[in-house]
Image (tube, rainbow, N blue to C red):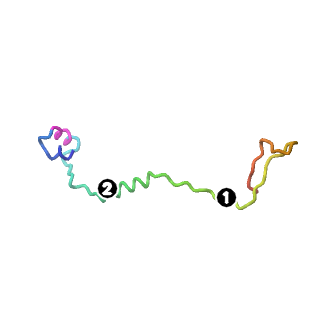
Amino acid sequence: MLEAIGDKKHERHVEIREWLGDDFNSQALDPESLKADVAALAKRWSRNPTVKKPRPDRPARLTGSLGRDGRLSRGCRLMACP
């Protein structure tokens, strides 16, 4: 692209000039400014790390009921005590 802009005899010179405009200056780019802009976008678009929830300090209790055979019924589950 830069070659086409700099060489008026290049086959794509007119096309790229129209696309970029006459005020395009390849020397006017500031790499540090671009780097900062990309870093800001990366920070904004990054996913937030997942945070593990702390385990409760209270003892667990069993909810539900036992069947005649001493096994838990289907609705039973382990829960933290209130």
Whether residue 82 is visible, yes or no, is no
Q: Position of residue 34 (x, y in %)?
A: 31, 55
Q: Main secondary structure of the magenta part?
A: helix
Give the residue at x 80% y 42%.
Answer: 73
The amino acid on which the numbered mark 1 sits, given as a three-letter code, is Arg
Q: Position of residue 41 (x, y in %)?
A: 40, 53
Q: Quadrant of residue 16?
A: top left
Residue 55, numbered circle: 1
Q: Position of residue 47 (x, y in %)?
A: 49, 51
Q: Position of residue 14 (x, y in %)?
A: 16, 39
> Which mark's residue is nearer the viewer, 2 or 1?
1
Crowd band around label 2 with a 10 angstrom C-alpha radius: few (<14), some (14–19), many (20+)? few
Residue 34, numbered circle: 2
Q: Quadrant of residue 11?
A: top left
Give the residue at x 35% y 55%.
Answer: 37
Q: Nearer the viewer, residue 64 or 18?
A: 64
State the extent of the magenta-drawn residues as a range. Answer: 11-17
State the separation of the CA atoms marked 2 and 1: 44 Å
State the quadrant of the C terminus: bottom right
Name the secondary structure under disc 1.
Answer: loop
